[in-house]
Image (spheres, grey):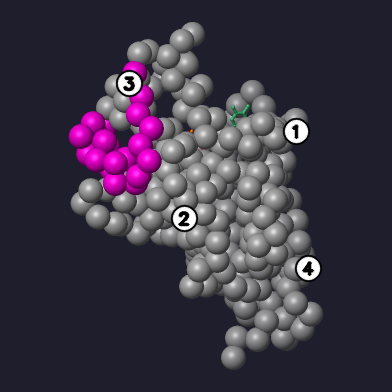
Amino acid sequence: MKPAPFAYQRPTTQAAVLDLLARHGAQAKVLAGGQSLMPMLALRLVRPELVIDLGGLEGADRLAARDGQLEIGPLVRHQQVVESALVRTEVPALAEAAGWIGHLEIRNRGTVLGSLAHADPAAELPALAVALGAQMICHSQAGERIVPAGEFFLGLFQTALAEGEMLVSCLLPLGAVARASAFTEFALREGDFALAAVAASLVTSPDGRVAEVRLAVAGMGPAPVTNETAQAQLVGQVPSPAVLREFADAVLSQAEPADDLRATASYRLKLASRLIVEALGESISRNPKGGVSRA
Ligand SMILES: Cc1cc2nc3c(=O)[nH]c(=O)nc-3n(C[C@H](O)[C@H](O)[C@H](O)COP(=O)(O)OP(=O)(O)OC[C@H]3O[C@@H](n4cnc5c(N)ncnc54)[C@H](O)[C@@H]3O)c2cc1C
């Protein structure tokens, strides 16, 4: 099938993108890496009047540490993140999560912000953003809105992005939580979407107890699944395997897994429980010896 006819513009400034978005509203679609939008156009799942290609935006591939945060611009590709020494050291879970996305050809084109804006329930990066407390920077002609990742993913392919807005960056807090972060997933074949995936970070204090824990699961409902109450209750405990399994159960009590051709809901729950314990174990092993002092 071929896409329905559409007009195409490739502005070179963000102001010009916002102007086009303001003038065309819901009839316009932003194109980043095209790895989700092009198939949707070809299948006529979307029929925009105008496609606004971000490919000409100067400096949009910025990936840098600034004021204690990692700033990810709208043209940062998955593979750029996988290969970044800064990301691999400071936010290892981000490099790992991006490495699970599709195949190399897809990672070379697809962008981090495109994946966040697309909000596929099985996608790796929305769970990562929720787990690590990212902030989504949304711009429109009306100005800037900063939306915490925990409030950005509203449901199946639904985000808090309003008409006329684009994501101009995602900010990930740097520090002990990001440095100890880990990501794991299970897919039936290499390059497939995950049956379940987990982004986690568990920071221990010098006495070996949990100082902070952050976790979100993908593929277990219409949006990333997390449980802030369970996270708060884990603080101060010794993270033994039994305690971590109990925590996994508490997180997954919020999940709404579905039966489909690839797996049953009950299989997904068992799988996610194993992955949660695995990701937390990996994160614990990434803590500096002697834990992190919070003084
Ligand atoms: C074979 C195959 C396998 C795949 N496997 C995976 C996988 O394992 N995991 C995974 O997560 N994804 C996977 N994908 C999907 C795809 O890789 C991601 O969704 C993709 O990387 C999204 O980024 P993009 O830059 O290509 O976005 P695009 O396709 O360009 O855009 C996607 C959507 O986001 C919007 N958008 C893009 N950028 C912005 C912005 N800055 N502001 C506002 N809206 C924006 C677009 O308008 C569109 O609605 C796969 C795709 C294919 C074809």
Badge 4 amino acid? Ser
Would you name the residue on which mark 4 appears?
Answer: 285
Circles 1 and 2, Cβ within 8 Å, touching? The answer is no
Would you name the residue on which mark 2 appears?
Answer: 170
Is 8 covered by the magenta stretch?
yes
Q: Bin the neighbour count of mark 4 within 10 Å (Cα to Cα): few under 14, some 14-19, many 20 and up.
A: some
Beta carbon at label 3 within 8 Å of ligand 1: no
Cα distance in 3D space between marks 3 and 4? 51 Å
- Tell me the chief SS of the magenta region: helix
Q: Closest to the observer: 203 or 34?
A: 34
Measured as percent of width and height from the top left, residue 260 is found at 60, 26
Q: Marks 3 and 2: which is nearer the front?
A: 3
Q: Does residue 232 appear anywhere in the picture? A: yes
Badge 3 amino acid? Ala
| Chain-order first, disc 1 or disc 2 | 2
Cα distance in 3D space between marks 1 and 4? 26 Å
Would you name the residue on which mark 3 appears?
Answer: 7
Beta carbon at label 4 within 8 Å of ligand 1: no
| Chain-order first, disc 2 or disc 4 | 2
> What is the secondary structure assignment of the residue under circle 3?
strand
> What is the secondary structure assignment of the residue under circle 2?
strand
Beta carbon at label 2 within 8 Å of ligand 1: no
Badge 2 amino acid? Cys
Q: Which mark is residue 190?
A: 1
**Among the 4 quarters of the image, the one containing residue 137:** bottom left
Circles 3 and 2, Cβ within 8 Å, touching? The answer is no
> What is the secondary structure assignment of the residue under circle 1?
loop
| Chain-order first, disc 1 or disc 4 | 1
Cα distance in 3D space between marks 1 and 3? 36 Å
Q: Closest to the observer: 108 or 26?
A: 108
